[in-house]
Image (cartoon, rainbow, N blue to C red):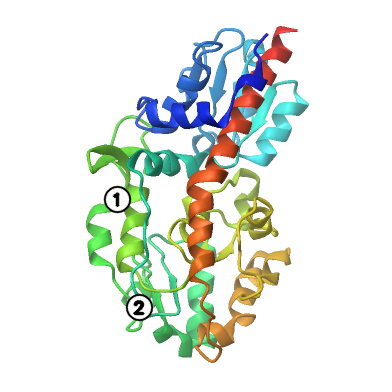
Amino acid sequence: MFDSSKITVDKVQHWISSCPEIEYNWFAGFLKSAIDDVARVHWWPADWDNFTSKDVIVLHDEHLRNKLPELFSFDKLKSSVVITSVASRFEYLKNIGVSAIYFPYLHWFLNLITIRKLKLKIPRAKQTKIFNFLNRRWQEGRYHMIEYICKKYSDIIDKGYITANTFSYYQDHSGFYKDTEFLKWYSVINSNDSNRVIEVNSIEINGVSAGLNLKNLLHVAKTVPGNISIQIETWPQTENSNSFLTEKSMIALATQQIPMIVGSRSNWLQDIKDQGFDIFDDVIDQSYDLNTDYLQRIEQCIDYNYDILSGKKLLPDISYRLEKNQNYLFNEWADQILLTLVKKIYDSLNELNQ
């Protein structure tokens, strides 16, 4: 039996500081350090025949869309602990008898452990815009918001820092910005290894392996103006069953901005608030998050906050709250979430051994 009660925050902090880099990321190394004595970890496996009883398997959810039924026909996987960041996948696994753990913050920790390794603070530069709305690649929700702003609220364009870097039309809009520095280095890794995605380590920052998303966080904090971070998450409503939190939902928290996030489903932002984060719903009208219609959420995000986004209503000084949010994300929250995860893994392994 594995005693999860002996796992403490001090141990979590030790594993963060001492873990090796595995599979181009630090989070896989953290898991290996935390459970190496009790189980074998398979990070984003491509070989589905290489498992033994009571292994720990971290699914590469982004690459496994709609593929689980055939993969989990192997009975030996049902004697392993499976970690997924997709809620619907977690429910499916439970229903077929797999010992599953739901961990929606996996992609956040691809950045957060690196931040801890680097002991980063990530301050914000002086702000010259009210908001920013950054879009590297086309997505239907982002396109809808850009078009909605241009057609109904064009007067707020000069109040914000908006990009549409790879959109066929709006990338050349006279009121939008072209972040040429960002476009130079932020490109998908060209590799034959399908596990190499943009979130994992491919560069170095101050001598520490890091991913391009962390470089982007530092770039946003240093060069992109705006007190409000408008984010349309990666997943449109049509892909809600495959959706999970990406770094886009973390950007505002990590860079001391007010989050204005539209996810693939309602209550996306509320779930972040339930984790103890300040979403500034006394300053910003976040009730759009309750609407079950995806496109209406996008429109209401702007409708309900037009006075602030246009500058007709000034934002109060909440700099201390923004800094507190960042500190909570990087430290107390990260420690507690990892502590809970490791305890769940130990408890799940104990259940398999009974």
Residue 299 in the figure: left or right of residue 176: right
Between residues 278 and 75, which one lies in front from this camera angle? 278
Residue 27 to residue 346: above or below: below
Residue 146 in the figure: left or right of residue 243: left
Locate residue 88: give its quadrant: top right
Residue at 45% across, 79% down? 130
Q: Residue 339 appears at what percent x and percent y? A: 59, 32
State the quadrant of the C terminus: top right
Residue type, mark 1 in image: Ser
The number of numbered badges drawn on the structure is: 2
Label 2: how many residues lie within 10 Å, few (<14), some (14-19) or many (20+)? Answer: some
Residue type, mark 2 in image: Phe
Q: Residue 245 appears at what percent x and percent y? A: 56, 48
Residue 276 to residue 159: above or below: above
Q: Residue 258 appears at what percent x and percent y? A: 52, 68
Q: Which mark is residue 187?
A: 1
Residue 330 to residue 326: above or below: above
